[in-house]
Amino acid sequence: MNRISRIHFFHDGLTLYTPTSKETHKADEIKKNPNVHILIGYTGEGFGDTYAEIAGTATLTDDRELIDRLWSEEMEKWFKGKDDPNLVILKIDPTSIRYMNEGSRTPAELSL
């Protein structure tokens, strides 16, 4: 599975989206192997973090409507604007979601 580190996600239902550059190693890896594993809320600073663990399938899209909908000024740190030719959206369709480290109620799994 590919590793995606500390990035910002947007969501529509359970589908996750994040901007990326098509010139990154991440984009190349996803083209070769679309299986991803994402930890949301995990800081890595020690044991006991409460977090969501998401396994899914990733695809890259340059859909203009989606880019327009997700664009924010904060993305200007990484892109020349929403028309930057390297800007693509990484779409993650979850196959399972696990909630971890919240006492005796976890792990709790949602299989999709």
Image (tube, rainbow, N blue to C red):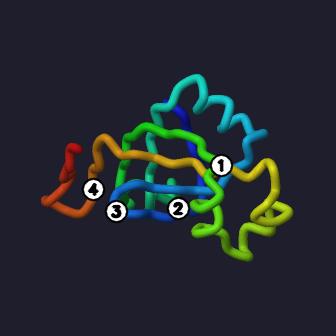
Foreground of the two, 64 or 34:
64
Residue most toward the top? 32
Residue most toward the left? 104
Q: Residues within 10 Å of mark 3 (few under 14, many from 20)?
A: few
Q: Amino acid at mark 1?
A: Asp
- Report the label total: 4
User: Is residue 5 visible to the viewer in this orientation of the structure?
Assistant: yes
Residue identifier under label 4: 99
Residue identifier under label 1: 62
Residue occupying image coordinates x 19% and y 62% = 103
Foreground of the two, 69 or 55:
69
Task: Judge whether 61 appears above or below 51 on screen.
Answer: above
* Local SS, label 1: loop
Q: CA distance from mark 1 to mark 2?
A: 16 Å
Residue 13, labelled with which disc?
3
Residue identifier under label 2: 9
Please tell me which of labels 4 and 3 falls first in the chain: 3
Q: CA distance from mark 3 to mark 2?
A: 12 Å
